[in-house]
Image (tube, coloured by chain):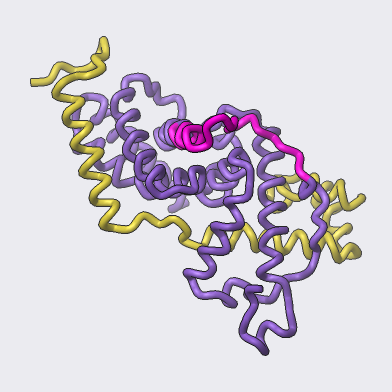
Chain colours: A purple, B yellow
Amino acid sequence: MELTQSKLSEASDELSLVRAAKAGNIDAFEQLVRRYDRNVFRIAQHITQNREDAEDVVQEAFLKAFQNLQNFHEQSKFYTWLVRIAVNEALMKLRRRRTGKLVSLDEDVQTEEDSVPREVADWAPNPEQLYNQAELHDILQKTIQGLPASFRTVFVLRDVEGLSTEETAEALDLSIPAVKSRLLRARLQLRNRLTKYFRRKKTQEESGDGQK
Amino acid sequence: MTCSEFLKELTDYLDGVIDARTRAELEEHLTWCHECYVVCNTTQRTIEIFKDSQLYELPDDLRGRLRSAIMSKCKSHQKTGAVPKPDAPERG
């Protein structure tokens, strides 16, 4: 019950901030920035895979949100609306970097990695502990970089940021089946790729070298 | 239930949004299919590892710089009213 109560008060608190910001209260908008800047940065980094671009996306997304607050009609959560702006900005950055290469959320690429995982080797019991944090981050970055942008985007919103399937569909302007299909592929492809690093190996503990 | 049918339902199963009957069928499949059992567990671990990884955390100094930049742009937009809105409040 407490959780529901706190979620409710969080939502009404957010709406008060949004309304105050709409009425020109810049401090209220700054509180919204403080509340969501980390999330927007994480989403932007996952999509663009580039630190400078992610920094730009954070600035541009919040500025656009501020400029267009009057067009936010409170039919969805402010955060979902903000994510939608941020994702569009991030995809634009990606397009600019890959000139000539189409980057779209409609991208629903069938790859040979799809559907049936070829690599079904089991993992070591606590595979992330085989690596220090920097090594683990490096592995995760390499792993997610290889996914199509549309899969990365759905994965980060659903599994990293914890948006619901419905919120993700709304933020990305995709149907619910499209979100689910991309999410399944993203999860399975990431799992396949991580298996290369995390598979159970006798020699791992002995040699202390599980990376190669 | 075949392995491909199992995989099709895997996302809903992991998200806990599946009806009781399908859930029972999936769990029955898991009792005898070791490969799907491994895929199911390691996919769950994949999600947890990414979620807990703190990958792409915004460092405090950069966070401060970004926030000042954002707020200063918002303030200058507010002052100049670069994009005036019909029902936007009058300032100054």
- Position in image of residue A45 (x %, y %): 46, 48
x and y percent of residue A126 in the render?
63, 75
What secondary structure predominates along the stretch shown in magenta? loop
In the picture provided, is B9 more to the left or to the right than B83?
right
Q: Quadrant of residue B57?
A: bottom left
Q: Residue at x 22, y 33 (%)?
A: B73
Instruction: Specify whether residue B9 is in view.
Output: no
- Residue B64's spot in the image, x, y percent? 24, 51
Q: Is B49 colored magenta in this rendering?
A: no
Residue placed farthest to the left in the image? B92
Q: Residue furthest bottom?
A: A206
Q: Is residue A104 above or below residue B38?
A: above
Q: Residue at x 88, y 57 (%)?
A: B29
Query: Where's the C terminus of chain A, which quadrant?
Result: bottom right
Point 54% across, 36% down: residue: A167
Q: Is residue A94 magenta?
A: yes
User: Which region of the structure is painted magenta?
Assistant: A89-111
Residue B39 placement, left or right of A183: right
